[in-house]
Image (cartoon, helix red, strand yellow):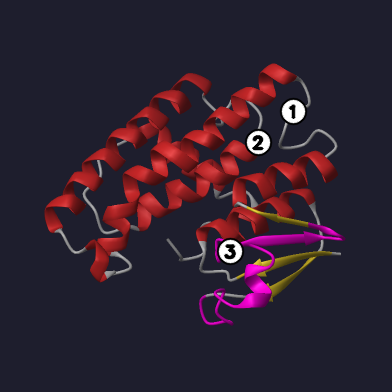
Amino acid sequence: MLTILGHTVSINVRKVLWTCAELDLPYTLEAWGGAGPATATPSFLALNPNATVPVLKDGDLVLWESNTICRYLAARYGNGALLPAAAAPRAQVEQWMDWQATDLNSAWRYAFMHLVRRNPAFGDAAAAEASVQDWNRRMAILDGQLARTGAHVAGAAFTLADVVIGLSVNRWLLSPITRPALPAVAAYHERLLQRPGFAAHGANGLP
């Protein structure tokens, strides 16, 4: 049995939960962070020195970093689902996963922390507006990619790239910002809504 340490408000925990749903993997969710026990404790830091969620325990294996956990689960239990075995298509999936974790996350972080989390460390309204503009530019890049594929982020098939980016699309749509019309992103979101895993862990009212 897999054990996932975290809480369901976390977008990064929800990546892992959605991956488990797509692969039909049973797991136990152990509450940490959020309303659960603090992660800055010796027992948690022994698992993840960054004091962040999620953490995955699979037997003796302990992993942190949500995209790495998702890759592991697909490689270990997916039988080719979500993450291709061949080098070229796998690299295409992973490049979009890396884009989500670096370019896209960096774009929305300030705006989200200012407008949604109301974190006082992100109190500069001008910086938040610049973050919104950068966020929208990155989403336009995604719109262009989805217009080219006509289906999913990395091509015709649903993959891990859609798990991590689908949650980011949900965050973009639910955040109180001015958004441009991105028709390919809108159509993509409608397709994701047909997936039970997205309904449970993506389009569940949480940004």
**Quadrant in the picture for residue 157:** top right
What amino acid is at disc 2? Thr
Q: Residue at x 51, y 59 (%)?
A: 11
What amino acid is at disc 1? Pro
Residue 80 falls left or right of residue 180:
right
Q: CA distance from mark 3 to mark 2?
A: 22 Å
Q: Is residue 31 visible?
A: no
Can you identify the residue that label 3 sits on?
53
Looking at the image, tell me whether mark 1 or mark 3 is earlier in sequence order. Answer: 3
Q: Residues within 10 Å of mark 1 (few under 14, many from 20)?
A: many
Please provide percent x and percent y for residue 194.
60, 48
Q: Residues within 10 Å of mark 3 (few under 14, many from 20)?
A: many
Circle 1/circle 2 CB separation < 8 Å: yes
Q: Which mark is residue 159?
A: 2
Q: Is residue 135 magenta?
A: no
Q: Compare residues 8 and 62 and report the one nearer the observer.
A: 62
Q: Which residues are magenta?
A: 34-61
Residue 101 falls left or right of residue 58:
left
Can you identify the residue that label 1 sits on?
84
